[in-house]
């Protein structure tokens, strides 16, 4: 059965469930390896803020075990952050170790990227067997968005940004490369995020939901 069949609101990236028991909403919970949180469906990885250069054999085994869980939709969030965590060289070692696993298992990846777009683009080219990549929490400018889309990325937008910026990004990103999320931000409700985006796109909620569900089906290989 298609898990998106009756879903109107897909929260592509969150860190905790806030809509349990609501059949029209599906929240993909992002777990840092070792976390134990409630989920219906999840992604898992070692976040760059807490990554170490060397991933242990036990961590590799645990990642593979989780990624083979039928409720696990992909690997993430993983990535690079120039503002927090270890130096970029060390973060890159951890990222590539995880990308090797995603490549082996055929999993899509959700990327945390802060001031490291050039490096992420370069690294993506080293992993042609990973078909689907998405940068989550995107809130940069439309020019970079176009560059990333041209390199094959999906973009999941940060829920809280000024109307002018959000509108500009929504008009820049092709709808077949778009996801919406809350990232568990305190004032973000995924239903409100969809309503706001639909209004800016001058479309209806059904059409927007249908397109994002189609994107998710392709991205997560559902």
Image (cartoon, grey):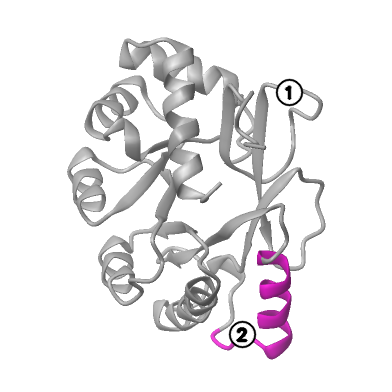
Q: Where is residue 35 in the image (x, y as percent from the top left)?
A: 77, 61
Q: Is mark 1 on a helix, strand or loop?
A: loop
- Left or right of 15? Residue 126 is left
- Left or right of 61? Residue 160 is left
Q: What element carries label 2?
A: loop
Residue 63 is covered by the magenta coloring:
yes
Mark 1 highlights which residue?
23
Q: Position of residue 186 (x, y in %)?
A: 64, 32
Query: Which one is in front, 116 or 62?
Result: 62
Query: Which one is in front, 17 or 214?
Result: 214
Q: Position of residue 143 (x, y in %)?
A: 17, 43
- Left or right of 183? Residue 151 is left
Query: Residue sitting at 28 percent across and 65 percent down?
Result: 121
Compare marks 1 and 2 and give the one earlier in the sequence: 1
Q: Badge 1: how crowded within 10 Å, few (<14), some, or many (20+)? A: few
Can I make out residue 99 in this image? Answer: yes
Q: Where is residue 44 in the image (x, y as percent from the top left)?
A: 64, 61
Query: Residue sitting at 73 percent across and 76 percent down?
Result: 62
The nearer-to-camera label among 1 and 2 is: 1
Where's the N terminus, which quadrant?
A: top right
Query: Residue sitting at 26 percent across and 71 percent down?
Result: 122
Query: Residue sitting at 58 percent across and 19 percent down?
Result: 191
Residue 9 is covered by the magenta coloring:
no
Res 27 → quadrant: top right
Look at the magenta stretch and give its main secondary structure: helix
Q: Badge 2: how crowded within 10 Å, few (<14), some, or many (20+)? A: some
Q: What stretch is highlighted in magenta?
A: 53-67
Query: Which one is in front, 71 or 142?
Result: 71
Q: How far apart are marks 1 and 2 (CA)?
A: 38 Å
Of all residues shown, which one is farthest toward the front?
Answer: 1
Mark 2 highlights which residue?
55
């Amino acid at each position: 059965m298609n898990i998106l069949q009756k879903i109107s609101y897909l929260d592509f990236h969150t860190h905790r469930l806030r809509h349990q028991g609501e059949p029209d909403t599906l929240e993909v919970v992002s777990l840092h390896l070792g976390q134990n949180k409630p989920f219906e469906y999840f992604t898992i990885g070692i976040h760059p803020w807490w990554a170490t250069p060397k991933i242990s054999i036990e961590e590799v085994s645990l990642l593979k075990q989780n990624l083979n869980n039928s409720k696990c939709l992909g690997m993430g969030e993983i990535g690079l952050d120039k503002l927090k965590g270890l130096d970029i060289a060390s973060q890159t070692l951890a990222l590539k170790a995880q990308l090797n696993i995603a490549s082996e298992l055929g999993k899509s990846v959700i990327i945390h990227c802060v001031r490291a777009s050039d490096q992420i683009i370069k690294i993506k080219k080293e992993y042609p067997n990973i078909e689907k990549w998405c940068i989550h929490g995107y809130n940069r400018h439309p020019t970079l968005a176009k560059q990333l889309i041209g390199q094959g990325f999906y973009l999941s937008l940060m829920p809280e940004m000024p109307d002018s910026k959000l509108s500009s990004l929504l008009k820049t990103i092709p709808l077949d490369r778009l996801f919406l999320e809350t990232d568990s931000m305190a004032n973000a409700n995924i239903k409100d995020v969809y309503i706001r985006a639909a209004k800016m796109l001058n479309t209806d909620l059904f059409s927007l939901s249908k397109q994002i569900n189609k994107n998710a089906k392709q991205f997560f290989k559902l």
